[in-house]
Image (cartoon, rainbow, N blue to C red):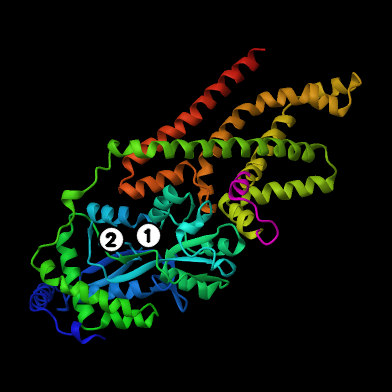
Amino acid sequence: MNPAIAHPALPSRILLAALLAITACSPTTTDGTTQRLPLRWGGDAEGGAPFVEADPSNPSQVRGFDVQVARMIASGLGRDPVFVQVAWPQIEASVARGDFDVGLSGVEDKPELAARTAITIPYYEFHEVLAVRTADRDRFKRLADLAGRRVATLAATTAYRILVDEQRRSGLIPVSYDEDVHPYTDLMAGRVDAVLLDNIIAARSLLRIGGFVVQPEPVATAHYVGVLARDNTALRDSIDTVLRERMRDGSLERTFREWGVWDDAQSAFFQRTLAEASLADSGGGSDGASSRPVAGLATARTYVPALIRAAAITLLISFAAMAIAVAVGMLVAAGRIYGPSAVRLALTVYVEVTRGTPVLLQLFVIYYGLSSVVRLPAMLAAILGLGLNYAAYESEIYRAALQAIPRAQLEAARTLGLSEFQVLRLVRGPQALRLALAPMTNDFVALLKDSSLVSVITVVELTKQTAIYAANIGSWVVPGLLCGIAYLALSLPLSWFARRLERRWISV
């Protein structure tokens, strides 16, 4: 540890002592013991080590360097840490609504975040690094070398913003993911040409997957911070004091070394942070209130074109998937009615398995599980996944409609000498279609909404683009309103058309 950061500044010591004295006056229980207040902190255990992960020896507990940072903070405040699980993209929204006191799970220090919330001082410095396949290490050394290529990252991160900016300059194609495992597996599978993420994530994936290299020159440098509700500046200032003390006494360094994420750059970073301590302790910092961006209709103009493009993708996926669902559903329904026993059994298994398992699981299996056999493009996998899933439901609608036609009509048609196919085409099918029209329309509207699930396989449709929009401005009000209007604009005309068609057929 550098001796330059071993001597605490007096104001920080005094403030910390005052905080501890205050916490010593905590309420007591009936037996005279001190009742410590909890410090609720939010993190995402799905993010995995070394940030936050479930302890393999006791899955009900979590471990990681952010877990230990939370414990340091709670101990410094005289409180008990209580972990709250939250999805990483929702940490800011959850802390704003009071689900927990502070979010600590690899939260990136970004200007827009500082303008919307109360953030702590940075406690770790990381680098955005470029990972490429080993064979491409000399071809793709910088982002500028990836013009027209697909580059993966996490949505709503500093890396994603960097890729969007580079897209305007060189034309590379950002590909967003909801988690940090599949970007690297897709890199090895050839679905993307590079991955831009934190050096910690890249190093972890290199050990886990291998087969790629991390370019030595960082693309950018950023920091991890804790995030609190905008008006919770008093607790934020107390946490800042504790973090500085843990920098000085070496606790943070020991934690980062324990998790294998310490490097020489952290010493210089700690020195810079502590050099600003006097300014922070004297209240010279700003909570960003004066620079808070307007998360209202004024920002919508920038995002509306992207939402329109995403709505077009949603519509394309929905129509294509519904076409597959109708075609396959008709074949399955006909097979279950007219086919031999072996065919009926096989089709029944397909229907029950498809309806009995989540569509999200089916999308994962088609896109990732089958990648060793066939590497489907994300859009095609999304269409097939939704189409085959809804085909099972459509087949039951058609089968019920076909079986609803009176047997007397079928017997009369056969008596007239019509073949079974002619009976189906001329007598049974048209009447069944009228009966099936209303539930078909309901299924299409449901499929239109379920298309939001395809974002898990990197397709940026309407809901995913809305989530990116909301993360960037720190509010779901306007993005959610625009997204809802878009879905209504897509589904209401279809419902109106179906009702009109149904009335016309009934009147015939």
Residue 348: % across, % down: 73, 47
Say which quadrant the C terminus sits in.
top right
**Position in image of residue 411 (x %, y %):** 85, 24
Q: Dot 1, how many residues are within 10 Å of its Cα: few (below 14), some (14-19), or many (20+)?
A: many
Q: Tell me the residue at 33%/57% (across/down).
A: 91
> What residue is at 20 percent from the left and 87 percent from the top?
3
In the rendered structure, the answer to whether residue 79 lies left or right of residue 91 reads left
List the residue tagged with mark 2: 100
Q: Nearer the viewer, residue 78 or 411?
A: 78
Identify residue type, mark 2: Phe
User: Vertically, is 270 above or below 490?
Assistant: below
Q: Could you tell me if the residues under marks 2 and 1 are in contact, i.e. CB atoms within 8 Å?
A: yes
- The residue pinned by badge 1 equals 86
**In this view of the protein, which residue sits in the foreground, 377 or 507?**
377
115 left or right, relative to 321: left
Displayed quadrant of residue 404: top right
Please state the horizontal and vertical placement of residue 309, each as a whole percent of the image: 48, 38
Range shown magenta: 371-383
Q: Callout 2: few (<14), some (14-19), or many (20+) C-alpha neighbours within 10 Å?
A: many
What is the secondary structure assignment of the residue under circle 2?
A: loop
Q: Regarding mark 1 in the picture, which secondary structure is present there?
A: loop
* Residue 107 versus residue 376 in the image, above or below: below
Q: CA distance from mark 2 to mark 1?
A: 10 Å
Q: Residue at x 27, y 71 (%)?
A: 123
User: How many numbered marks are there?
Assistant: 2
Magenta stretch contains residue 180: no
| Numbered mark located on residue 380 in the image | none
Q: On screen, 126 above or below 250?
A: above
